[in-house]
Image: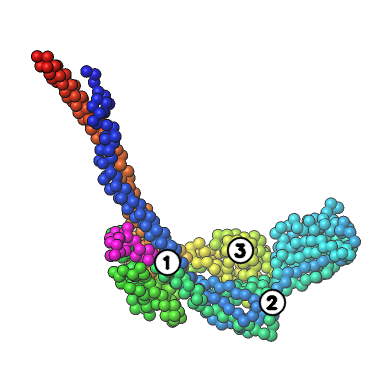
Amino acid sequence: MASISSVGFGSGVFSSELIDQLVQVEREPTVKRLDQREAEINTQLSDFGRIQSALINLRLSARVLSNPDALGALKATSTASNFSATVDDSSAVTGTYSVEVTELAQAHAIATGVFVDKETTLGTGTLNITAGGTSAAITIDNGNNTLEGVRDAINAESDLGVTASVIDTGSGYQLVLAATETGLDNAVEVNVTDDDGNNIDTSGLSQLAFNGSAQNLTETVAALDSSVKINGITLTRSSNVIDDAIEGVTLNLTGKNAGSPATLKLELDSSGITERVQDFVDKYNELQTLVNEVTAFDTSTNQSGSLLGDASLRNIMSQTRNLLGSIVSGLESAGVRTLSEIGITTKASIGESSSDSGTLIFDATTFKQKLASSRDDIMAIFAEQGRTTDSQVKFLSSTDLTKAGSYSINVTQLATRGALTGSLGLAAPVTIDDDNNNFKIKVNGVESADITLTNGSYTLDELTTEIATQINADSNLKGANATVNVSVDGSNQLQITSTKYGSSSTIEFTQVDTNSAATLGLSVATGTAGVDVAGTINGQTATGVGQTLKAATDDDSTGIKVQITGGSTGDRGTVTFIEGVAEQLVSLVTSFVSVDGALSTKTDGLNTTLQQISDERVKLDERLESFRDRITKQFIAADILVTKLQSTQDYIKQQLDALNGVNQKS
């Protein structure tokens, strides 16, 4: 009998469809379990993603409040429209000022007469143009001696501070020279070396002269400084933008109000600050509402949120709530110490079923009242802050490694500035001439160009002002922010002092004029260098640079920088570093969402579980394939057995039928 290799081929009792049904029965419970678990994990991943997004939004709002400027914002309001004011919150203080603009600064402009043709030649020679302390010698020859040629030659001097243009008046052409900056100091002066030998007449190139000897150009716009009275004190500046009259305030002058002073008020921007705090509260409430949703349990349906009972989420919210409800370290004895004391309270206990359970309530009225009376403490509640007990010790900064606390300060050496003292006691008047008016100086290691004093007779005050003005105007020194103070000591000796503190603060004369030593007491010499401040913070040796002391790197005070502006050596009190709620929350949320933080760890675990489910599906397929092979073999064996039984049955039936036939014949 031939072998059977296909299910049901021999007997017809067993079939492939029956095997498929048995395999499906074996598959279904496991697939349902895996599908359900996979759906739960994906829901949890989605909800943790929403939690992370809400935390990041909260961190962004907290970061705004962690900036002290956000809570110390000032606004400027004025009763006039002829000027505006912008405020630098880091240096401005509240106050009221009377502001009267009596003059606006103007940029100088001068023009030639009207020429019929812009190709008219103007002569040849050299134009020496000066504006704002910058000069340029411009050669005018037969190739560029027209109105347009002179214009282009002047404009090629990009750093001159003067622009030239040719104006079509409708009846002819004029060459106009205009200062690029406003103010008397930027007035345009034109000196001419005319090839015709006469430098001041109105013919040839000298027709462009405009100086103390010849004014052959017409002044179309006078050079003017701005003039403004602030609280009755008259100030003049070369610009209409004044940023050095009221500390932290920049005035932009646009018109005059002479005789009608306006009131400028600098006051706390309480509305803007309140909006920032409200945003912080809103972002926290969005997070808490989401947490309530994903951890809810509906008793009517017995349905629960995907993260009900999740330990990671419970830990995250517990740390966040504890932070928001705690007294800020360093403010224990302050007027306000917690969020609840400034109008931010919790609506309900966390255990309640309401969707807004645990959210915050913000009483803006209470907050504004506290802001008006305890602004400094409120800034410390949210942002980081340093407080010192010595008025001549100023907190500068900290780092992420700085721990909240109070740290002692001891100064063993005060910072000094580099200085050089002249060798001669001066007596007024002092004459400056061509034999003592020139020198070079190094300030903080930066050497000046040749510096020339203005010749004349000076009192000692006038002399020190002239020397300081010329040194501080040097472009080399200005570029390096190297400036000096000049005075006379008790013996009337000149004393030149760097404005910088520390060991890099130096004064050195590298070149002097013929009679400088004899008349001014100045010679090629190096003065006494400054020294850096030295001392300890929290008992640990600090690093001194200039007036700045920086705490040791292996201490709780790490990152603290203070400025010692004066005083004496010895114990200088304490510096207290306060880390506000918003600042701490930024760090806390960052720890949650970092690569190895609680959220990342949790989502990594969930993703691992998803991979395990995927692996289980593969194993299930392999197991079911093995199951199919096994029962197929069993079915084939049974089919063969049934076929044999059927063959035996047929044989017996044939034998019985044969016996039955014999009997019938008998």
Q: Residue furthest front?
A: 665
| Residue underneath mark 2 | 255
Q: Which residues are magenta?
A: 286-310
User: Was residue 500 drawn as part of the magenta stretch in this picture?
Assistant: no
Pick the quarter of the image with the C terminus.
Answer: top left
| Circle on res. 478 | 3
As helix, strand or loop, the secondary structure at mark 2 comes to loop
Residue 659: where, in percent of width, then height? 11, 17
Q: Amino acid at mark 3?
A: Lys
Pick the quarter of the image with the N terminus.
Answer: top left
On the question of residue 382 being in view, the answer is yes
Mark 2 or 3, nearer chain start: 2
Mark 2 vs mark 3: in front:
2
Residue 430 appears in which quarter of the rendering?
Answer: bottom right
Label 3 CA crowd tier, 10 Å (few <14, some 14–19, many 20+): some
Mark 2 or 1, nearer chain start: 2
Q: Amino acid at mark 1?
A: Lys
**Is there CB contact under 8 Å for labels 2 and 3?**
no
Residue 85: where, in percent of width, then height? 60, 74
Residue shown at 64% from the left, 63% from the top: 474
On the question of residue 597 being in view, the answer is no
> With 257 as the anchor, is 356 left or right in this view?
left
Number of disc labels: 3
Mark 1 or 3, nearer chain start: 1
**Is there CB contact under 8 Å for labels 2 and 1?**
no
Label 1 CA crowd tier, 10 Å (few <14, some 14–19, many 20+): many
Whether residue 226 is situated above or below residue 169 in the rendered picture: below
Q: Amino acid at mark 2?
A: Gly
| Circle on res. 447 | none
Q: Along the line of sight, which residue is nearer the eye, 496 or 313?
A: 313
| Residue underneath mark 1 | 283
